[in-house]
Image: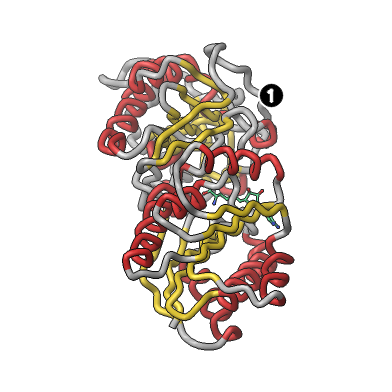
Amino acid sequence: LTGARSGARPAAAGAARITLKAGKDRPVLRRHPWIYAAAIARVEGDPEPGAVVAVHDAQGRRLAWAGYSPASLLRARCWTFEPEAAPDADLVTARVRAAVARRAALGEHTDAVRLVFGEADGLPGLVADRYGDLLVVQFHAAALEPWRAPLLAALREASGCTRMLDRSDPSLREREGLTPSVEEGGTGGGRCQVREHGMLLEVDTRRGHKTGFYIDQRDNRHLLAQIVAGQVRAGRPPAVLNAFCYTGAFSVAAARAGAQRVRSVDSSADALALGERNASLNRSDAQMQWVCADVFAELRALREAGARFDVIVLDPPKFATNAHQVERAARAYKDINLGALRLLAPGGALLTFSCSGAVDAELFRKIVAGALADAGGDALVRGRLGAGADHPVSLSFPEGDYLKGLWLERC
Ligand code: SAH
């Protein structure tokens, strides 16, 4: 049998196979890359974690090739949907090159760029972020493990980065039955400085959130700067509130654009300390306040104190990590949006976000509309916001569309 079909690749020969239950092949036929354990009728060939498996439908037709993950409910992640094209080192290398090439145009405004965004780039579970000449990687799927060496080699070569840091999340790896991954390439990591639309920002790649920085908010920080600059031109340098400020990237964007004062609130003292440092790296005349507090309580306290802001940014952490938490998350989103709308001056701007994948854009709009109904008055949607172009979303994988936001103008 081996090689009987011309063009069959070595990995195809003798590969283990999974057979889907009848009627459970629809997502695969639509090129959705995730196969849950519940969709699988049979596993043959005793595949190891990460092994390449052929994916068959109930009639025995081969539909796809996937990487197997015996420990996870997300049992397999598809590499290709061509029955004859099993993945190999050339395929993963080509995908890394294509992913890096896709971002080539973004380098003009920043050197903090997401070079690989998992499933959307055909590299399930892989994240690679560039911070200048430092590459920070995350391996979050068993499917990736056999390809670690060619993936890292391709990333190094395509990005030109000279340093590399593995920031894989041990708890996400554990879900895939994987041990914490070891750091590759030795010398990388720690603090580094990046530029973004004229700002200079320090990133803690070892201890910071995600790979150290919220790269996905780049365009929205730039939008904030434009909104602030518009108010400055109109003779009204705004008072800005940045809630859930993390290391102050939105705050610095507002300050540089001419805000009169910027109040930045976060519950993490470490994040605030780096925020202050970031403010000091960038020249501005804005009065900067850094407040270590719970945003829910702070919004209420500000209201009681009669505070007013012309521009507010609300960029909370993920309130819902799965569908079961959506209701509770919706209440939390409504609470903070109501609090923010009550503090917003007439004509003021609110940039409000949700990064919960389980809360889609329409639900988020409804939650914010509910908050507005309680706050009274009206608001205009001036823009629908999302992650930057280095976070592409595959139409067959809507789960990748996690960040959504609204730019509202208070009437
Ligand atoms: N807007 C930021 C990213 C925000 S991440 C940027 O562009 O860089 C979310 C932040 O919310 C984290 O810094 C976390 O410390 C903070 N946080 C989480 N829960 C909080 C709470 N209840 N009150 C205040 N800050 C909170």
Q: Position of residue 198 (x, y in %)?
A: 36, 41
Q: Position of residue 260 (x, y in %)?
A: 48, 60
Q: Is residue 10 left or right of residue 264?
A: left
Q: Find disc 1 in the rendering and name its residue.
A: 179
Q: Secondary structure at mark 1?
A: loop
Q: Which quarter of the picture shows residue 406?
A: bottom left
* Residue located 47% across and 16% down the image: 163
Q: Quadrant of the N terminus?
A: top left
From what the image shows, is residue 77 above or below residue 408?
A: above
Nearest the viewer among 186 and 117 is 186
Nearest the viewer among 13 and 346 is 346
Residue 30 visible here: no
- Local packing at callout 1 (Cα closer than 10 Å; few below 14, some 14-19, many 20+) is few
* Residue located 41% across and 58% down the image: 224
Nearest the viewer among 135 and 69 is 135
* Residue located 44% across and 36% down the image: 200
Furthest toward the bottom, the residue is: 377
Q: Amino acid at mark 1?
A: Thr
* Residue located 55% across and 34% down the image: 211
From what the image shows, is residue 51 above or below residue 252?
A: above
From what the image shows, is residue 230 above or below residue 158?
A: below
Q: How is the image coloured?
A: secondary structure
Residue 66 visible here: yes
Furthest toward the top, the residue is: 186
Q: Is residue 48 left or right of residue 12?
A: right
Q: Position of residue 28 (x, y in %)?
A: 43, 46
Q: Position of residue 376 (x, y in %)?
A: 55, 88
Nearest the viewer among 303 and 84 is 303
